[in-house]
Amino acid sequence: MSAPSSATGPRLIDPRGHRFGAAFSIVLLALAFLLQAPVIVAFVGLALGISAWFGTRYSLLGRPWPIIRRVFRIGPPAELESEFPPRFAQAMGFTMLALATIAFLLGLTLLGWVLTGAVAALQVLLATTGYCLGCRLYFLRWYLPGLFTRLAR
């Protein structure tokens, strides 16, 4: 799931592991909806929060990926990516699922499922196409201030 990085650079990860974790979370969130089990939503949110806070090497949702790579003899990725954008995206997913869990606890089940569905939809996008909206938003925090400065001149 990961490769060593230099002491000065970010930790590099296999992007396929990130996509696998998204697919696994889709299955869990769909199961939560079918069983009407908000506790599963809370578990997925907690898993995303742990990975966002401590790093993707602690991802509960991506944990099976290295095993799958070995069993099916999947070769190394064509390229690695920094783990920072996926961690940012996972923090966003954690926030949304935490809000969904709070909504469930307050009896606002429709709101809870809408928030859960939004996260699941973005996970489907990531798992099927590799496009990570949260990762793109991570890069906007660098781009937008510079764009504002250029436009303000």
Image: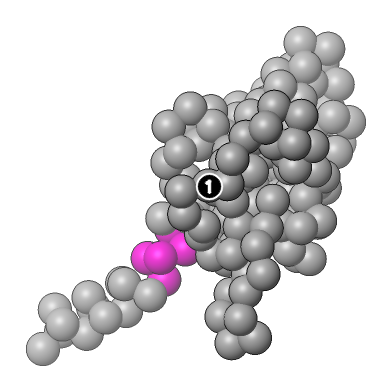
Q: Quadrant of residue 11?
A: bottom right
Q: Residues within 10 Å of mark 1 (few under 14, many from 20)?
A: few
Q: Is residue 17 above or below residue 107?
A: below
Q: Quadrant of the C terminus?
A: bottom left
Q: Is residue 149 above or below residue 120?
A: below
The overriding secondary structure of the stretch rendered in magenta is helix
As shown in the figure, which amino acid type bears the numbered disc 1? Pro
Q: Quadrant of residue 62?
A: top right
Residue 136: percent from left, percent from top: 41, 55
Residue 131: percent from left, percent from top: 42, 41
Question: 35 or 89: which is nearer to us?
Answer: 89
Span of residues in magenta: 137-141
Residue 137: percent from left, percent from top: 43, 58
Residue 127 lies in the magenta stretch:
no
Q: Is residue 69 above or below residue 79?
A: above
Q: Tell me the residue that label 1 is attached to.
A: 77
Residue 79: percent from left, percent from top: 47, 54
Question: 150 or 6: which is nearer to us?
Answer: 6
Q: Residue at (77%, 17%) from the top-left corner?
A: 31
Q: Is residue 19 left or right of residue 108?
A: left
Residue sitting at the far left: 153
Q: Residue at (56%, 80%) from the top-left corner?
A: 9
Q: Is residue 1 left or right of residue 15?
A: right
Q: Residue at (59%, 40%) from the top-left corner?
A: 75
Whether residue 27 appears in this view of the structure is yes
